Amino acid sequence: MSITVTTSNLNGIRAARRKGLLAWSDGRTPDVWCMQEVRAPQEEIDPIFGAIGEGYAKAGKVADAASLARQDEVCRIKGRAGVGLLSSLPVTARRYGLMDLDEDVDSGRWIEADITAPGGMELTVASVYVHAGNTDDPDKMHQKFRFLDRMLERMAQLRKIADGGGRQALLCGDMNIAHTPLDIKNAKANVKHSGFLPEERAYVDRWLDPEQYGFVDVMRSLAGEVQGPYTWWSQRGRAFDNNVGWRIDYQLATPGLAGKALSFDIDRAPSYDARWSDHAPLSVVYDI
């Protein structure tokens, strides 16, 4: 039996709904769906999640709209960040926030759900939105590196649990780092820009190093050493039309889960005007 896990940066759930989010959701209904940049107050998120749940019910994925497990955290800074997680699979526990980070700017960036997959496999899935950073603003870069440091701490904990026979872990989200020149169209032009700085990419090296944290970049492991495929394109110019993109959306899995990945899909819209976000959803099918 297989499950599909999707991660997608919505670039604002209200705008995404106006642009076709529900039609996409009704046609896909992933078993687990991690969202970033929800960027809306709770009273506006709830009815949209409800509408998504109705689509899952019509597709037979849940008994009714209310049966779709819903979790989100709104950023305490209005109009910023915000993460969500929907699951048609049973959720046994929910956690909010990353380690001891409690500043407003760090809210709405990390939530976890413990999920039971068909057959009884136990997973911890996190929806993650890493700070974008800005090389012209030292405070924003400090916030990003502080968040990345706490990520390392949590990843070490999750890996220890998995290695001890406990839950496998899956981190899904917009990490705002392109790892290698294969993950960005114009690598040389961006080596001094946030998102492709050597010191940012070094964190990804550590995430994936079997001698350190030992997570697996699932999409890259399936795609091989090819250019792209990208998951984000700037709204400026003709970046989307010319496929001048970045691969900054990831599914990072502990090895016991990564080895069960069968395939991936980046659902790039057929045209600029058909997009409901500046990111494309990344979905992975796991044989659990």
Image (tube, rainbow, N blue to C red):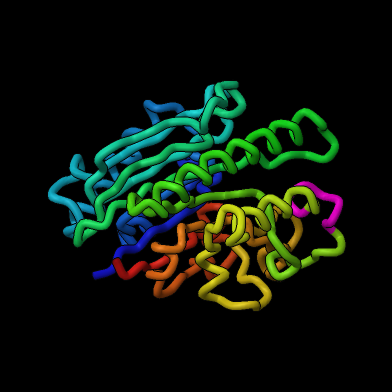
**Main secondary structure along the magenta-highlighted residues:** loop
- Residue 204 at x, y percent in the picture: 65, 55
User: Picture quarter containing residue 41?
Assistant: top left
Q: Could one spot residue 155 in this view of the protein?
A: yes
Instruction: Tell me which residue sits at (45%, 63%) in the image.
Output: 255
Residue in view at x 19 percent, y 40 percent: 66
Asked whether 73 or 119 is in front, the reply is: 119
Q: Nearer the viewer, residue 232 or 166?
A: 166
**In this orientation, does residue 278 appear?**
no
Which residue: 65% across, 54% down?
206
> At 68% from the left edge and 57% from the top edge, which residue is drawn?
205
Looking at the picture, how far across and down is residue 99, in whole percent?
Answer: 52, 30
| Vertical arrangement, residue 29 with respect to residue 77, above or below | below
Q: Give the quadrant of the C terminus.
A: bottom left
Q: Nearer the viewer, residue 7 or 152?
A: 152
Q: Which residues are magenta?
A: 190-196
